[in-house]
Image (cartoon, helix red, strand yellow):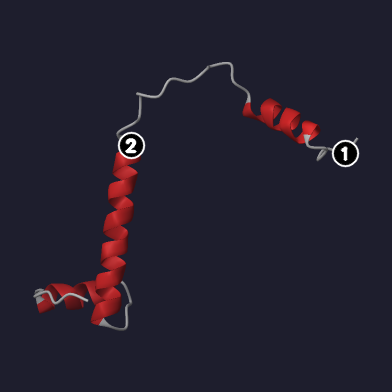
Amino acid sequence: MAYVIVDNKLLEKARKLGHHRTKKETVVAALDEYIKRRQQQGILSLFGKIEYHTGYDYRNERKKENSRDGLLQS
């Protein structure tokens, strides 16, 4: 547990906007959202850097895989 001094007006505004019952719930939700957003930004930074095969057909590959595993029925 950590003690942090937060602007009460800002916290209350976030609590109401997020429909949270408590200040703790508000802070936890805000931190969770912050983390998710930063992770998404990390993924977006890979855009254009990953090479891929233009002729790759994931549906065909999935069919082959399922066929090998005996999952497809005739």
Foreground residue among 10 and 1: 1
- Between disc 2 and disc 1, whose residue precedes? 2
62 vs 48: above or below: below
Residue extending farthest right: 74
- 42 left or right, relative to 5: right
Question: Picture coordinates of residue 40 (x, y %)?
Answer: 34, 45
Badge 1 marks a residue whose secondary structure is loop
- Residue shown at 58%/16% (left/top)? 55
Q: Which mark is residue 16?
A: none
User: Can you tell which quarter of the image residue 67 is in?
Assistant: top right
Measured Cα–Cα span from mark 2 to mark 1: 39 Å
Name the residue at 63% across, 23% down: 57
Task: Identify the residue shown where x is 43% and y is 20%.
Answer: 51
Q: Which residue is mark 1?
A: 73
Quarter of the picture holding the N terminus: bottom left
Q: Is residue 46 rendered to the left or right of residue 4?
A: right
Say if residue 16 shows up in the picture. no
Q: In the rendered structure, which amino acid carries the disc numbered 2?
A: Leu
Farthest bottom residue?
21
**Can residue 22 be spotted in the picture?**
yes
- Report the disc number at residue 44: 2
The picture places residue 11, in percent across and down from the top left corner, at 17, 75
Amino acid of disc 1: Gln
> Is residue 62 rendered to the left or right of residue 30?
right
